[in-house]
Amino acid sequence: MTALSGARILLTGGSSGIGRALALKLADRGARLAVAARREPQLTELAAEIAGNRHPAPYVLPVDLSVRGAAADLADKATRVLGGVDILINNAGVGLVDSQARLGDSAAARASFETNFWSPLALTTALLPGMRAAGTGTIVNVTSTIQAVPLPFLGYYAAAKIALAQATRSLRNELRHTPIRVLEVVPGATDTGLRDINKLPWHGGRPPRTLPPVPPEAVAAATVRALERDHDRVIHPAYATLPIELPIVGRLVAAVGARRVDTTYHPAEEIAQ
């Protein structure tokens, strides 16, 4: 069991959704936090709420992780304000809902990969030496079940998340002879601003009926339990394990869903967390 009290944690994507819920739960456990996201006002409100709960206010580190080099600067700032980082939680994500045929490798497409894939790797590279020197540390990468469900218009987000998932598994194997732990958090349908499925151009104007999304607080609680119990991976809700472990299920779901999407329409909508 790992105690989170006093742990120095850098959490990205802390302004809303899963990240915000995680910050509150980690603060309740006694962790010392540095929270990062693009939206400084929301981070400031979060810090005030945590302080109002009689916990130390987290350090607020506004950053745009879609900018190359921003992750390394963030790692340096977090190390300075916290005196070191024991746990890195790569939670920041940006959803891009659009056609690959239209966007290709445009600036918007590359920026989404910078946030969703390259920044977690850059933060990990920057903070691992300090963890190695301390003889302890944890890297947490938040991916998604969309990695196994290739729906139209969600290719950029899905590709970045499956890339991050594979990088996470490889990193775990690279570090297996060290005290550094690597945890993958795989949220299923979650009621956050990244519910891109609601933004797809569905025939009839509304998405098909699915199981209701879980609240971000439930994913945050599952993540905290996984950290405390030294797990390598957590998938929440549990039924989301099916497309991850049986990819044919995810492909079938995507094939059925694709027939309901108007693929002649090209939404150009970005949803950030």
Image (cartoon, grey):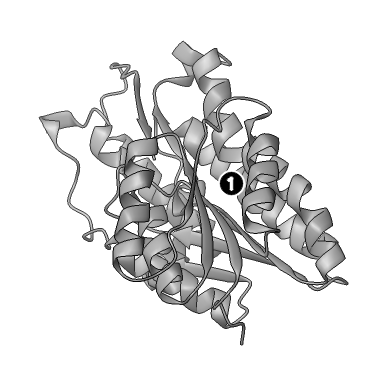
Q: How many marks?
A: 1
What residue do we see at 38% from left, 65% from top?
A: 219
Please indicate whether residue 135 sits to the left or right of residue 198 in the image.
Answer: right
- Point out residue 207 in the picture as x, y percentages from the top left corner: 19, 41
Q: Position of residue 105 (x, y in %)?
A: 58, 16
Q: Name the amino acid, label 1.
A: Ile
Q: Residues within 10 Å of mark 1 (few under 14, many from 20)?
A: some
Question: What residue is shown at x 40% (from left), y 38% (from top)?
Answer: 151
Would you identify the image quadrant in which residue 254 lies? top left
**In the image, what residue occupies the spot 28% across and 17% down?**
265
Horizontal side of 142 relative to 272 (left or right) equals right
Q: Is residue 236 visible?
A: no
187 and 93: which is toward the camera? 93
- Which quadrant of the view contains residue 169? bottom right
252 displayed left or right of 267: right
Q: Position of residue 206 (x, y in %)?
A: 14, 37
SS under mark 1: helix
Q: Report the residue that reaches farthest toward the bottom.
A: 1
Residue 212 seen in this snapshot: yes
Residue located beneath label 1 in the image: 162
Residue at x 71% of width, y 40% of height:
122
Q: Quick check: 146 above or below 54? A: above
Q: Quadrant of the C terminus?
A: top left
Q: How far across and down, in percent of the image, does residue 114 sit?
A: 60, 30
Against 180, is 155 above or below?
A: above
Return the residue found at the far left: 204
Q: From the image, which quarter does the N terminus lie in? A: bottom right
Up the image or down, 238 lies above or below 141; here it is below
